[in-house]
């Protein structure tokens, strides 16, 4: 197989702060073989693809999606339509959503709420024909009867927690997803976001069983008490981490943030184009206080963060991770750090650092090429010129 040399005005190999002007990336047989100044990588047998005015960077990682959901305007209608579609129709829709994400430069999707093993079926399909991003799946999230996300089918008695983890491990999931508190996925029938759904001992049971099976655990936790319990129980990641203590009441816990930073417990905060509407409706100061100020607070505390679009939920499309990234910048996180969160940092948090996330020799050639420089404007990430995954153009 012939080498392919990609060249552009700049290469951002990762992590944050690294850049190569007039750089190049050499690809062979699906993997990166060299990165550096373009003129040093050229050789007679290489096919050269030049991208003037562009930036080459690692493919993006969206760490929080729901591929079985259709991202309509109303959450209850989304849930209803999901319940009405059979597996084969859902799989067709999921394929379309995942492919749209890949065309937008998202080369890895982490699905935190599936049903009936559909994401695993998509993940394990023939990769020569499906042309989709790398997929990580938790299967059906663990929740309580009538709890948040119970419509996926994962509601269970707390006495069955070990068995539930074992069943998911045997089905080949990549991690365990636990709805530790109420939330916003099932807004009309679930506990409120400031209420716990599992206690510390129950979360510890899930963590022990999952770690025994070699699987990490992520806890969906808006409620401050649920976050504290999840961290104490040893989860590997927190979804949302809103620190809700009552209706429209947020109390960030500095001690908890320091513990997460010390232990490397990452936070996946989700955002979509909805964040701009929220800011417009309630004002910048209130939106910062209730929702997005935690992004800069966690950054300043040194807590690892991985962005997620929450694709599939209301108005959250699978090809729009950039809106989530822009929320981080609006909240005060430096732009280069935001780029790192969506590439190098996410790969590290998801145990994919030896596979993807940086432009490093021997890693998969998961590459995004955009017009302009996203260090100057994150909107450049929407101006996709080309996407390569595992060395194949998409």
Image (cartoon, grey):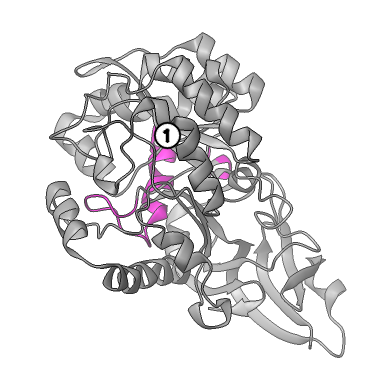
Residue 143: image location, x then y, percent: 34, 34
Q: Secondary structure at mark 1?
A: strand
Residue at the spot of label 1? 178
In the orientation shown, which residue stands out farthest toward the top? 255
Residue 23: image location, x then y, percent: 74, 67
Crowd rating for badge 1 (residues with CA inside 10 Å; few <14, some 14–19, many 20+): many
Frontmost residue, 152 versus 13: 152
Q: Is residue 339 above or below residue 387?
A: above
Q: Quadrant of residue 242?
A: top left
Residue sitting at x 37%, y 52%: 114
The magenta stretch spans residue 321: yes
Viewed as shown, does residue 377 lie left or right of 356? Answer: left
Frontmost residue, 319 versus 370: 319
Viewed as shown, does residue 82 lie left or right of 221? Answer: left
Q: Is residue 211 above or below residue 335?
A: above
Residue 227: image location, x then y, percent: 43, 20
Q: Quadrant of the N terminus?
A: bottom right
Frontmost residue, 238 versus 368: 238
Frontmost residue, 115 versus 372: 115
Q: Is residue 60 above or below residue 255?
A: below
Residue sitting at x 14%, y 35%: 281
Residue 279: image location, x then y, percent: 23, 35
User: Which region of the structure is painted magenta?
Assistant: 311-337
The magenta stretch spans residue 369: no
Q: Quadrant of residue 5?
A: bottom right
Determine if residue 239 is in view: no
């Amino acid at each position: 197989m012939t080498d392919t040399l990609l060249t552009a005005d700049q290469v951002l190999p990762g992590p944050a702060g690294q850049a190569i002007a007039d750089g190049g990336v050499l690809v062979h047989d699906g993997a990166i073989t060299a990165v550096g100044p373009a003129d040093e990588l050229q050789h007679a047998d290489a096919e050269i693809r030049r991208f003037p005015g562009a930036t080459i960077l690692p493919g993006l990682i969206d760490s929080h999606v729901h591929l079985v959901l259709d991202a309509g305007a109303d959450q209850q209608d989304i849930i209803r339509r999901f319940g009405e579609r059979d597996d084969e129709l859902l799989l067709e829709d999921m394929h379309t959503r995942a492919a749209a994400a890949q065309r937008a430069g998202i080369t890895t999707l982490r699905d935190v709420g599936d049903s009936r093993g559909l994401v695993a079926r998509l993940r394990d399909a023939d990769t020569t024909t499906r042309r989709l991003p790398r997929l990580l799946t938790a299967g059906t999230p663990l929740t309580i009867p009538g709890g948040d996300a119970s419509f996926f089918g994962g509601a269970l008695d707390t006495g069955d927690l070990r068995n539930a983890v074992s069943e998911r491990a045997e089905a080949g999931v990549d991690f365990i997803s636990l709805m530790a508190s109420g939330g916003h996925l099932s807004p009309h029938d679930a506990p409120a976001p400031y209420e716990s759904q599992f206690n510390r001992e129950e979360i510890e049971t899930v963590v022990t069983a999952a770690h025994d099976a070699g699987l990490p655990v992520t806890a969906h936790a808006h409620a401050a008490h649920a976050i504290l319990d999840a961290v104490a129980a040893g989860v590997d990641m927190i979804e949302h981490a809103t620190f809700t203590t009552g209706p429209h009441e947020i109390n960030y816990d500095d001690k908890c943030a320091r513990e997460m930073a010390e232990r490397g417990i990452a936070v996946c905060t989700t955002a979509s184009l909805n964040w701009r509407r929220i800011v417009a409706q309630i004002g910048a100061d209130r939106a910062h206080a209730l929702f997005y100020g935690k992004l800069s607070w966690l950054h300043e505390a040194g807590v690892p963060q991985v962005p997620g679009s929450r694709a599939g939920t209301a108005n959250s499309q699978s090809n729009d991770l950039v809106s989530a990234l822009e929320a981080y910048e609006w909240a005060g996180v430096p732009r280069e750090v935001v780029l790192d969160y969506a590439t190098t940092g996410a790969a590290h948090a998801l145990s994919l650092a030896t596979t993807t996330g940086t432009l490093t020799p021997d890693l998969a050639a998961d590459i995004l090429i955009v017009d302009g420089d996203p260090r100057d404007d994150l909107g450049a990430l929407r101006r996709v010129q080309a996407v390569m995954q595992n060395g194949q153009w998409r």
